Image: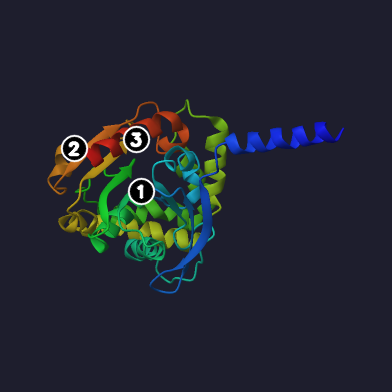
Amino acid sequence: MKSIFTATILFLALLTGCAPESTFIKNDIAISSDAERIAYSVYGTGSTALVFIHGWSCDSRYWREQTAAFSNEYTVITIDLAGHGHSSANRTEYTIESFAEDVKAVIKKENIRRAILIGHSLGGDVIAKSAELMPEIVVSIVGIDTYHNVGEIVTQEFVDQMLQPFTDDFVTAAHEFVGSMFPETADKDLVYWTKEDMSSAPKNSAMNAIRNYLERIVSGESSRVFENVHVPVMSINGLTWPTEEDANRKHIKDYRPLYIEETGHFPMMERPEAFNTILKDALASLEAQ
């Protein structure tokens, strides 16, 4: 009996030794420039960090299909911007500039020396501003379903009209807004979860953030930031909304667009395997460049 027990223990030990180790490293908190507590997670230990930045009313969970796919080769960091996820929410103004300070705080806390920033939607503006803040660390930025036309100008009246339904009834407006960003063929459970999750965001911080984001387009700041971004810029966009490549190149010095078919605004969740393949190829081309 003892020999059987010993053999079983040895067998289990061998199985454990052969199993791939988890790439998860830790959850942690960084203190931003205005004392907000920024929650983030780290996976892997690669020499280059991939820092994933979520979009409006989202959080780090929206990158759940990417952490394991990239952490064998890179240090993967996912961040909850202030007012989102597990980060604190004490700001009066939730601006693109303050979100970039959140990213900077995490990169500084982790002592990152070389980073590629990947930002979804509003996160595209955040990573552009972050690249301006950290030119010695950020070697490239990749926007996800963003940068459709960085030089587009809209009026303040347009912004006010767009946001009025959210002011009147945030949950209903968010439901409709998020639902419109998926194709009819999208997974119904994913659509339901995303609508419910994003409409559950705190109204005050959500409204403040999206107004700042849109008013940067009104003022032209969303395109002017690229005057100080001197690294390669890529976008991985769906085909639901056109990407004005030539217009982007008027503002972005080194720009390359890539596309993913059969997705709406959330390609990293809608078609994660296809998205990860495209992103891996994009990273390989960036490294070669």
Q: What amino acid type is highlighted by mark number 3?
A: Lys
- Residue 61 place in picture, x, y as percent: 51, 47
Q: Colour mode?
A: rainbow
Which secondary structure lies at badge 1? strand
Residue at 50 percent of width and 42 percent of height: 64
Mark 3 or 1: the one toward you:
3
User: How many marks on residues?
Assistant: 3
Q: Are marks 2 and 1 in contact (CB under 8 Å)?
A: no
Residue under label 3: 280
- The CA span between labels 2 and 3 is 21 Å
Q: What amino acid type is highlighted by mark number 2?
A: Glu
- Residue 188 place in picture, x, y as percent: 55, 31
Q: Earlier in the sequence, mark 2 or mark 3?
A: 2
Q: Earlier in the sequence, mark 2 or mark 1?
A: 1
Assess disc 2: are there few (<14), some (14-19) or many (≥20) residues with their C-alpha within 10 Å of its C-alpha: some
**Quick check: 111 left or right of 189?**
left
**Quick check: 173 left or right of 49?**
right
Looking at the image, which residue sits at the far right? 1
Q: Earlier in the sequence, mark 3 or mark 1?
A: 1
Which secondary structure lies at badge 2? helix
Query: Which quadrant of the rendered structure holds the N terminus?
Result: top right
**Quick check: 104 left or right of 285?**
right
> Relative to 253, is 190 above or below?
above
Where residue 81 is drawn, which disc sits there? none
- Residue 88 place in picture, x, y as percent: 51, 66
Q: Quadrant of residue 34?
A: bottom left
Residue under label 2: 245
